Amino acid sequence: MNLADVLNLDNESKRVAICATVIETEEKSYTDKMTGEKRRFLKITLQQNNDAVEMVLWDDTLQEYAEKIKNLKDNVIVVSAQIRYSDYLGANSLSSYKSTILEII
């Protein structure tokens, strides 16, 4: 799917495959409300031409792809993700899920 189509609100909750360039990464952490554990996530900004979309790689995906994601910035990736509406952004974004696949090209 094109990143421009990700932003279409009608596509919310769809699982898609994206090929894009990673232009920015930022690791953050949060406390799990259920377990109280400190967990990590990685916010990445993906770009295709003039379109950019934020994606969140959750802790389980970070652990599975730890070696691959050390140097994501400025690389082209192919990733499977779910489109989710973000109240924080006021737009759709991408989110990893349990069986997300990530490849660096």
Image (cartoon, rainbow, N blue to C red):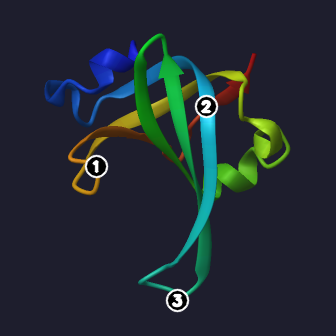
Near-viewer residue (41 or 46): 46
Whole-percent x, y for residue 53 in the image:
41, 32
Seen in the image, is 21 located left or right of residue 49? right
Given residues 49 and 38, the one toward you in this image is 49
Q: Earlier in the sequence, mark 1 or mark 3?
A: 3
The residue that disc 3 covers is 36
Which residue is the extreme one toward the right?
Answer: 67
Residue at 61% x, 53% y is 26
Q: Nearer the viewer, mark 1 or mark 3?
A: 1
Which residue is disc 2 drawn over? Answer: 23
Amino acid type assigned to the residue bearing label 3 in the image: Gly
Type of the residue with mark 2: Ile
Q: CA distance from mark 1 to mark 3?
A: 26 Å
Q: Find residue 97 and name its label.
A: none
Dot 1 falls on a residue whose secondary structure is: loop
Q: Which residue sits at x=47%, y=10%?
A: 49
Residue 35 % position (x, y): 51, 86
Q: Position of residue 23 (x, y in %)?
A: 61, 31
Sort mark 2 into few (<14), some (14-19) or many (20+) by Cα contacts within 10 Å.
some
For marks 2 and 3, give the one nearer the viewer: 2
